[in-house]
Amino acid sequence: MLSDIAYIGLGSNLGDPVEQLKRALVSIESHAHMVLNASSHFYASSPMGPQDQPDYVNAVCRVKTSLQPQELLASLQEIENRQGRLREGDRWGPRTLDLDILLYNDLALETKQLTVPHYGMKDREFVLVPLFEIAPDLIMQDGKSLASWVGKCSLDGLYRIEEKSEKNRE
């Protein structure tokens, strides 16, 4: 039964990033244990870490799933791998696709492989703005509204680049 809600951050800056995100959304949507409920517009932003790499394209989607967090992580990593993700080199380096579990229900989890809520999300406008687009009334685990987090982030260098597909509009 698909009863758990997860928010997934998508990012890419290699191999036609817009197409990478579109392909990832199709893979998520066609997964047997996930239903894609909503996806944000695509946003461009400067890279975190080394600046000698292309800008990123980011989005956030909401899924219903029957997968437990570790199983969801494994499924997302399979999608990344199919799209040419290499897990070598610089942690903040360029990548074809990065899929991060941002939130999973109201769960707080910290393991070697997975931290939920995502450890850096409240400081990343390229996560908060698209998340706010699809979940404006979300209350975060610290009891604050997502809107208050978005209100504190810098929007310098973040801009919307892609309309949502008709199929993914709420």
Image (spheres, helix red, strand yellow):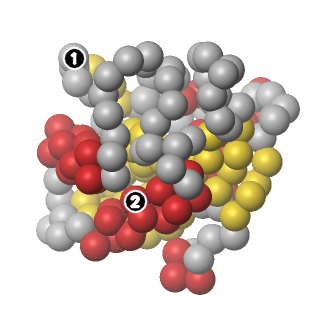
Which residue is disc 1 drawn over? 112
Image coordinates of residue 24 in percent, x first then y, are: 40, 59
Which residue is pictured at 23% across the width and 24% down the height? Answer: 113
Image quadrant in which the N terminus is located:
bottom left
Between 50 and 118, the one lying in front of the other is 50
- Residue under the image location 33 percent in, 63 percent down: 28
Query: In the image, which is nearer the foreground, mark 2 or mark 1?
Result: 2
Can residue 33 be seen at all in this image of the molecule? yes
Instruction: Rate crowding at label 1 as few (under 14), some (14 to 19) or many (20 or more) other CA atoms within 10 Å.
Output: few
Left or right of 42 on screen, residue 72:
left
Name the quadrant of the C terminus. bottom right
Residue at 67%, 37% (x, y): give it. 55
Inspect this view and state whether residue 136 appears: no
> Considering only order in the chain, which callout, 1 or 2, is on the residue closer to the N terminus?
2
For mark 2, does the 10 Å Cα neighbourhood hold few (<14), some (14 to 19), or many (20 or more) residues? many
Q: Position of residue 121 (x, y in %)?
A: 54, 29
Say which of 141 and 72 sits in front: 72
Q: Specify the amino acid type for callout 1.
A: Lys
From the viewer's perspective, tell me whether residue 30 is left or right of residue 99: left
Residue ID for mark 2: 24
